[in-house]
Amino acid sequence: MTLAAHLLDLAARHSPLVRDTLRRLADAPLADLLAGLRPGRSRPWQDRDDLCAAVADLTARSYGHEVAAEVAADLRAQPIVPTSNHFGVDTFADSVQGTLLFALRPGAPRTVVVLGFGSVSLNNLTYPMGLRLYDPRHGELDALPQRLPVQPNRDKHRTVLTARPFDAGMIERAQARLARMRRAGEVSAFCARSADDVLHRVYGAPETLALPSHGLQATRVNTALWRGLFQGEPPARLVQVAIEPICAALLESDLNDPGSLIHQLFFVPQVREALLDGLDGERACWERSRSRGTVFFWGLGAEGRRVPLTLHGELLTGVDERGRRLEWKFSPEGLAPALRAGLLLPSLFTCFATLAFARGLSCVGGYYQATYLPVMQRGVVAALGVGEEFRDLAGAVAQVSTGLHLASLQAAARSLPGGAIIPAGPVEIAGAGGLSPADVAALTRVPVREAHVVAFPDVLDHLVPAGELPPGWAARLALESGAARAVRLETP
């Protein structure tokens, strides 16, 4: 058995999602998987007009009213979006290439709308506080990616939504650090040149530095990185917006609407208790006995950190990083003003209940979301089963499609001298001159099995316990030819 085959077997053993995908589509081209990414056909419990309006409103602030109108029309026609991404500057190869593949699915509109979570910290996996660089440290093939910070280290625990804008001084310090990394042999000349171009031309553009918020800056950086992926015109316009403000806007009405799904889940006591018990301890939900996770919302601490909350009777409470007690009455009039002020942030569960379960938005996830979203759905349906009066609502929730995913799939790879294959993020793809039209066409012909192998250096250690991975597996995999049919970007 080759190393690639062994790693595929390990991934399948630990991830039911990977196992099912390989069982159905291992030797099929990615085009076959993409063809299955279609919005659900069932009628949602709540109309989606307010969702389209909320997304359009947020889009207009970053991209202008013309793009916002196009986004609203596309969402009405195809209510399906990626939702496993994090908001903020994105140089994570797995999420960037996942977005690219999503834009290449059959019949995709001219805009690709990505709803990203902004309540995560700046130091999260995708590393929005700086750049992820897919370059071997001192030439070691298992020492990647590397991180190049732009935001100061003191802010690493702040949520992306509360991050301070970056300035010229931060960029200059990042460039100086990059130069030191190059002198020490930690990055190649190719990587140093590519990253410096992003810092100078994209981060350091006067138009970017003049923007008043980190979120607006990140949107502009990601737009430039997206364009840099292609030698020609991109296949679609990238539109990235934060998911929490959209849900907060929708919750303003849902909290006060007795017919809404959220109102039933939050304010009908027997439904709420059944829900809290049914999802207790589940991934991305809450664990009340150990005060882990958070119940329905995150609080926002004094230093921009999110604070887990618990529900005690009719009070939602938590303690922030300074020991300050946070408290809100768990009622429409207690929650709505705090949401409006940004002091409360909808949790993963609340976001998906608002968008997917209530309004039938098809949410395309990664290997985590495609596992926990069906569990959340079953928990909601079971909780609504406490009363016959909720039967129609439970039936509508049960019809929502929750298994859509683009999990650990990368079709483009960086080819090093000697034939080694490593992942390629947007910095490296742009540094190699971008993907040609022929490259873009070839992406969807890469077999699903090999797209998993390309992605493994980026994601496998999140799927498989470290103790089960063979020593030096990433370096050995890079030297194998298992990803021979990936689109290769030749770089020095």
Image (tube, rainbow, N blue to C red):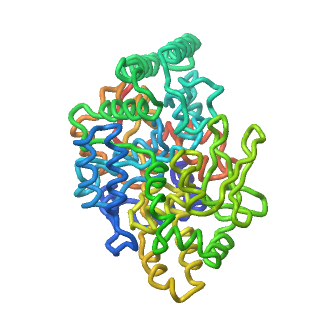
Residue 96 lies, in percent from the top left, at 41, 41
Residue at 34% from the left image edge and 47% from the top image edge: 57
Farthest residue to the bottom: give it: 388
> How many discs mark residues in the rendered view?
0
In the image, residue 67 sits, relative to residue 129, either above or below, namely below
**Where is residue 14 drawn, in percent x and y?**
60, 60
Q: In which quarter of the image is residue 429?
A: top left
Residue ID at (59%, 50%): 344
For residue 13, side relative to residue 308 (left or right): left
Q: Position of residue 86 (x, y in %)?
A: 49, 44
Q: In which quarter of the image is the N terminus?
A: bottom right
* 272, 456: nearer the viewer: 272
Q: Position of residue 258 (x, y in %)?
A: 49, 73
Residue 30 vs residue 8, the one in the foreground: 30
Of 176 and 140, which appears nearest the observer? Answer: 176
Name the residue at the front extreme. Answer: 333
Residue 151 in the figure: left or right of residue 330: left
Q: Horizontal placement of 227 versus 171: left or right?
A: left
Question: From the image, which quarter does the C terminus lie in?
Answer: top left
Residue at 34% x, 21% y is: 207
Q: Quadrant of residue 100?
A: top left
In this orientation, does residue 336 appear?
yes
In the depicted structure, whether residue 96 falls above or below residue 371: above
Depth order, front residue of 460/58: 58
Say which residue appears at 65% left-offset and 64% top-offset: 282
Q: Can residue 485 be seen in this view?
A: no
